[in-house]
Amino acid sequence: MNQTSTVEAHGETPTIKVSKPDLLAAWSILENLAVSLDQIGGVFGETGDGPVDRDKRLASLEALIDYLSPSLVSSINEARLSLGGYLDDEEAEAVADKIPYWDYRKLGG
């Protein structure tokens, strides 16, 4: 794993070298998430053309539950940890501080 920063020819955008297996693993997970969530949304998404269809909403939740399997979540975490190794702790923390995570506390109780 090479953590040495390099600068592109334009001198504007800092880059780092990432191993191809790490890049492919992370890209595969992102591709999986983007395509799968788009398909779930396409099948079950609300059109705004009237009241929310309760059955459709429940079906979309079931599709998400089925899709977000422990194995997928584990793969996401593995890719995250792998790419996180390319960042120093301070930089990783700065990025993490800007992410709008889902917050269970919004559920109340």
Image (cartoon, rainbow, N blue to C red):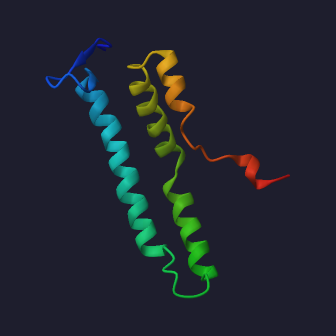
Residue 39 higher or lower than 21, as above or below: below
- Locate residue 75, reporting x and y percent: 44, 38
Q: Give the residue furthest to the left.
A: 9
Left or right: residue 32 versus residue 63 is left
Which residue is drawn at the image coordinates 47% and 21% (left, top)? 91
- Locate residue 7, reporting x and y percent: 22, 19
Left or right: residue 9 versus residue 29 is left
Residue 72 higher or lower than 77, as above or below: below
Left or right: residue 60 versus residue 83 is right
Which residue is drawn at the image coordinates 49% and 30% (left, top)? 95
Is residue 5 or residue 80 the one in the foreground?
5
Quadrant of the frame with the N terminus? top left
What is the quadrant of residue 59 in the picture?
A: bottom right
Which residue is drawn at the image coordinates 56% and 78% (left, top)? 56
Is residue 34 or residue 28 the one in the foreground?
34
Using the rendered image of the protein, determine whether residue 18 is visible from the camera's viewpoint: no
- Locate residue 67, reporting x and y percent: 49, 57
Using the rendered image of the protein, determine whether residue 31 is visible from the camera's viewpoint: yes
